[in-house]
Image: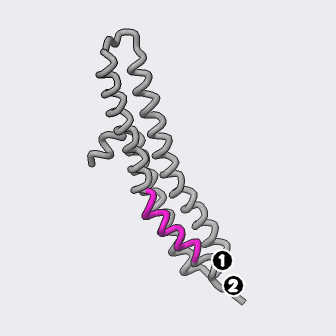
Amino acid sequence: MNMIRECGGPAWLAILLSGLALATAAAALIVTLTVRARAAGLGVAIVALMLSLSIGVLGLLGKSWGLRKMEEALQGDGIGIDPSQMARIRAEGTQEASECVSVGLIFMLLPLLISGGALTVGVFKKQPQ
């Protein structure tokens, strides 16, 4: 829970997108296993795979956003901090921003595995005669 709090808004967006990706991946797996047409399952599986990968990208973007916000805060004119404290603030801010990458990877894993399984089933499924 600390990771989500430290990452902030991008973490909550990753959780929301993860739920959508998980539902799409489950639907893709069901479609590939039940529908005879191979293309339908492959299409849904590819969409689920792209949604899953976008969660990881969102984690990277969240880190970039957090680092940019930290630097903007430290560059303010009204801030009068000695250099030793500024280095400590930068180290802590960098660590907090890096939590977004962890959140993105963690929430990407399950939908990615399920959509990858659906894609594999769809690719190797025999075409109806």
> Would residue 121 appear left or right of 19 to someone viewing this image?
right
> Would residue 59 appear left or right of 116 to someone viewing this image?
left
Q: Residue furthest right?
A: 129
Q: Position of residue 47 (x, y in %)?
A: 59, 60
38 in relation to 24, above or below: below
| Region rendered in magenta | 108-120
113 in relation to 129, above or below: above
At label 1, the amino acid type is Arg
Q: Position of residue 83 (x, y in %)?
A: 34, 18
Q: Which mark is residue 38?
A: 1
The residue tagged 2 is 127
> Would residue 56 appear left or right of 12 to someone viewing this image?
right
Is residue 23 visible in the rendered image? The answer is no
User: How far apart, in angstroms, are the residues tagged by discs 2 and 1?
Assistant: 7 Å
Return the disc, 2 or 1, that comes first in the chain's sequence: 1
Going 63% across and 70% down the picture, which residue do you hit? 42
Tell me if residue 118 is in the magenta stretch.
Answer: yes
Q: Residue furthest front?
A: 84
Q: Position of residue 51 (x, y in %)?
A: 53, 56
Is residue 124 visible in the rendered image? The answer is yes
Are the residues at dot 2 and dot 1 in contact (C-beta closer than 8 Å)?
Answer: yes
Q: How packed is label 1: few (under 14 Cα within 10 Å), some, or many (20 or more)?
A: some
